[in-house]
Image (tube, grey):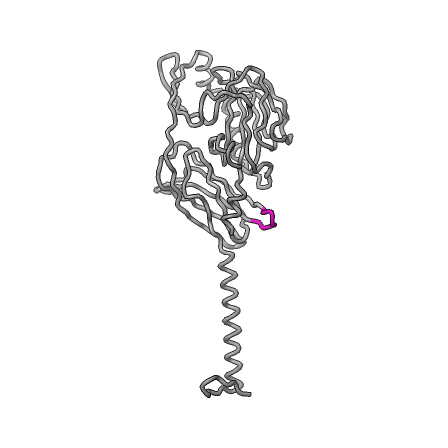
Amino acid sequence: MQLVIPGNRHFNSKTVSRFRALIITGCLLFTMVGALSAKDPVLFADDYVKPGGVVQVIITGEPMDNISVSLQDAQERTLSRSEGFLWRTPTGRTVSVALLGIPSTVTPGRYQLVMNADQGRAEWRLERSVTVTEVLFPARVITLSDKMNNLYTDESERKKTEARKLWAILTAFNKTAIYHQGFLETPLEDGIPTAGFGDRRRFHMPDGSESTSIHFGLDLWAELGTPVKASGRGRIVLATERYLTGNTVIIEHLPGVYSLYYHLDSINVREGEMVNQGIRIGSVGETGFATGVHLHWELRVGATPVSPEQFLEAPLLDTNALISKME
């Protein structure tokens, strides 16, 4: 057998077999390289974020386990951290997602998003720059009464135990807890804002000393006993009376995403219960470390306090943005 090539060049059967083998091998290698590159993880996220905002991270490629995403400064110090979970698209595709809260204390500038993950025996580390923009948070001066001062400065074992329990709840991460992906609703229909997220507070003590603090949530005033509603669907992970926050309810909405309701006059839910958005969970009160009747509404993402108001106008999980980044 001969292979005839234009130009009257002739090849014998042995040469033809080698030529065919090279072609087949080349095609296989090309296919394999294409497949591997298609499976390599790629990190997508917005270029800009505000202090108190949330970065939505998507990692394309094969779904991965043990994902962590952190915000690091130029000295590689970790400023916030969260874990990832798997999200299934309407078409059945599964991708890795992480929501990372940005502390309100982060100064404007360039930072690194760092992702670490496992994929079988492979370990991945991906980095991407993100710019934190400037936000000016108001400063407030609060004069404490003797009663408030005692609550604030108390170092009792109860206070420490409750703080440890709260931290354990807020740092818990259940990868299957995908209960609410959409917009949040205000827990008080006609609540009047009296203090904003990120307010820089300076407490004046009765003895003339001062202490500083940052407000982690949004304070809303309403009449005593006004119904407080769940801002989103989720699981009640705490419903109890606490030393500082008074009657308290915490709802888990997504893996690592919790809404908190402080200073309630009454509690109408039980721990472990699933609640729908808009369900009454309690009523406005003045329990715990409260300067007056109000609701303290807070949102945590990966244990980092973030502004809850941003999710009145944007979904907790922006599925449209996720899908667009995958195309």
What is the x, y in percent for residue 3?
A: 52, 85
Q: Which residues are magenta?
A: 88-94
What is the x, y in percent for residue 151?
A: 47, 17
- 240 vs 33, left or right, is right
When the figure is inspected, residue 62 is found, relative to residue 183, above or below; the finding is below
What is the x, y in percent for residue 107?
A: 36, 35
Quadrant housing residue 7: bottom left
When the figure is inspected, residue 27 is found, relative to residue 279, above or below; the finding is below
Residue at image coords 39%, 45%: 129
Of 265 and 321, nearer the camera is 321
What is the x, y in percent for residue 82?
A: 49, 40
Residue at image coords 53%, 22%: 262
Of 93 and 40, nearer the camera is 93
Majority secondary structure in the magenta region: loop
Quadrant housing residue 53: top left
Of 269 and 91, nearer the camera is 91
Quadrant the N terminus occupies: bottom right
Residue 260 among magenta residues = no
- 278 vs 83, left or right, is right
